Amino acid sequence: MDSQKNAEIIARIKYLMKEMGMRQVQFAQRIGVDTSNLSKYLNAHMPLSDSFLNRLVVNLGVSKEWLIDGTDLPFGKTPVRIDNGTAPTVASSETGTPVYDVDATAGTASGRNELFATENIVGWVNLPNVSPHCRIVRVSGDSMAPVIMDGDFVAVREVSNFNQIYWGQIYIVQLDDFRLVKYVRRHTDPNMVVLRSENPNYDDMDVRRSDIHEMLLVQHVLHLNSRL
């Protein structure tokens, strides 16, 4: 494994630690490795082994494709599916992940704060592997079908550093006039990105990084048979 790929995998492991709110000692215990060895891995003092990476996949339920190559969603291709009769109750108490009664693909840059306005919260849910630090919003349209269907919900995390993009991941991208839910792909011009749909009927979009106001990483896709 070359040093660049090794560094990218380490960055994704650190992302997992931040996402799970764990320090090195807690994370090492969770995946069943010695704390000192984890530190060596994270500081590139020890090459990443297949055994170590498999521990992450097995113990965290993380997608190996995402971990190794940065493709797929962090927690795999299989979305969280909430079926009739099994959907958790949307609680009124402020515990779990907040659910917003808004369409993530509607609105302009000036309306971003309104997207996560307190009055748009309809409740909170507790779902496997979905961090309470995420926000759950609705998506409309078929450009990402069948990965994200019209009316599905997504759990998203805000991105503070636009220079650290997980290429091939799905993001909600905020432009001047609209929001889009797209795969973000690397462009030959480092000042630009490619926004790609899952639906082949939609063409790629070349967008300048400077035109992007906000990015929200789609952490999970929630296929809801019983709408929240």
Image (spheres, rainbow, N blue to C red):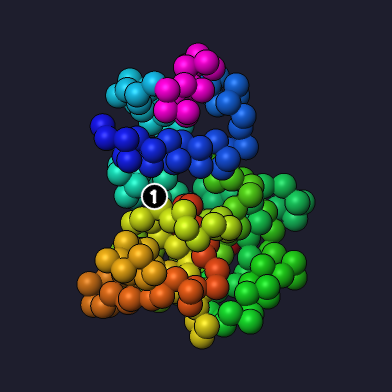
- Residue ranking furthest to the bottom: 177
Q: Residue at x 77, y 51 (%)?
A: 93
Q: In this orientation, which residue lies closer to the viewer: 74 or 153?
A: 74
Tell me where residue 64 appears, x and y as whole percent: 33, 37
Image coordinates for residue 17, horizontal then vertical, percent: 55, 36
Query: Who is closer to the viewer here, 56 or 135?
Result: 56
Q: Quadrant location of residue 185?
A: bottom left
Q: Which residues are magenta?
A: 31-45
Asked if 133 appears above or below 17 in the picture, the reply is below
Q: Assess whether residue 111 is covered by the magenta stretch.
A: no
Q: Position of residue 113 (x, y in %)?
A: 68, 73
Q: Relative to 178, is 54 above or below?
A: above
Which image quarter is the C terminus in? bottom right
Disc 1 marks which residue?
73
Amino acid, disc 1: Leu
Q: Residue at x 59, y 45 (%)?
A: 131
For image coordinates 33% across by 76% down, the residue present is 206
Instruction: Return the x and y of residue 121 as percentages of the image width and height.
Output: 69, 65
